[in-house]
Image (cartoon, rainbow, N blue to C red):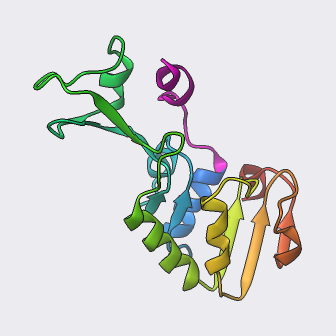
Amino acid sequence: KFYRDKMLCDTAKPNAAHLKLAELEKAGKLKAVITQNIDNLHQMAGSKNVLELHGSIHRNYCMRCGKFFDAAYVKNSEGAPKCDECGGLIKPDVVLYEEGLNDRTINESVKLIANCDMLIIGGTSLNVYPAAGLIQYFNGKYLVLINKSETPVDRKADIVIHDSIGKVL
């Protein structure tokens, strides 16, 4: 019930920030988007190389047989969703409270951050770990922070903009 009511938002649409990031990637100016969002909006906007630290509501798997289910199946199920083949519980491919992040996604994120010239961090308070800790791997030239409010690393950034990322981009 919590997942369906609070996390399974399948009606959201990409905003100006999602669209601009996809445009930058298409132009060869952006290598990847590393996101904590679980809504697939970056992909809907056209981004191809998206690392989803917290997973996606659009991937759901039977914990017994591994069968894939889309978000609509989970949304329209009654109670805890069950597999239509084996009866096993279906789990969203989303990091739930106290679950660890995917090692492959973390390792790829660290590699990209460690090897980029410019890191743009936007729309995050940088208070949620372990995602907020990824900034420690940045060795590049320019750190840009775009967030409505201050973050714990504002003083380390080359450019800080306190505004909406959609407006700024």
Q: Which residues are magenta?
A: 1-16
Would residue 49 be visible to someone looking at this image? no
Nearest to the observer: residue 123 or residue 42: 123
On the image, the x and y values in percent for residue 151 come to 83, 60
Residue 10 is one of the magenta-drawn residues: yes
Query: Which residue occupies 14% across, 37% down?
Result: 65
**Image quarter of the C terminus:** bottom right
On the image, the x and y values in percent for residue 58 come to 37, 38
Residue extending furthest toward the left: 85
Residue 99 is one of the magenta-drawn residues: no
Nearest to the observer: residue 16 or residue 145: 145
Query: Which residue occupies 56% across, 68% down?
Result: 24
Position above or below: 126 against 160: above
Residue extending furthest toward the front: 98
Would residue 161 be visible to someone looking at this image? yes
Nearest to the observer: residue 91 or residue 36: 91
On the image, the x and y values in percent for residue 37 come to 55, 47
On the image, the x and y values in percent for residue 113 come to 57, 77
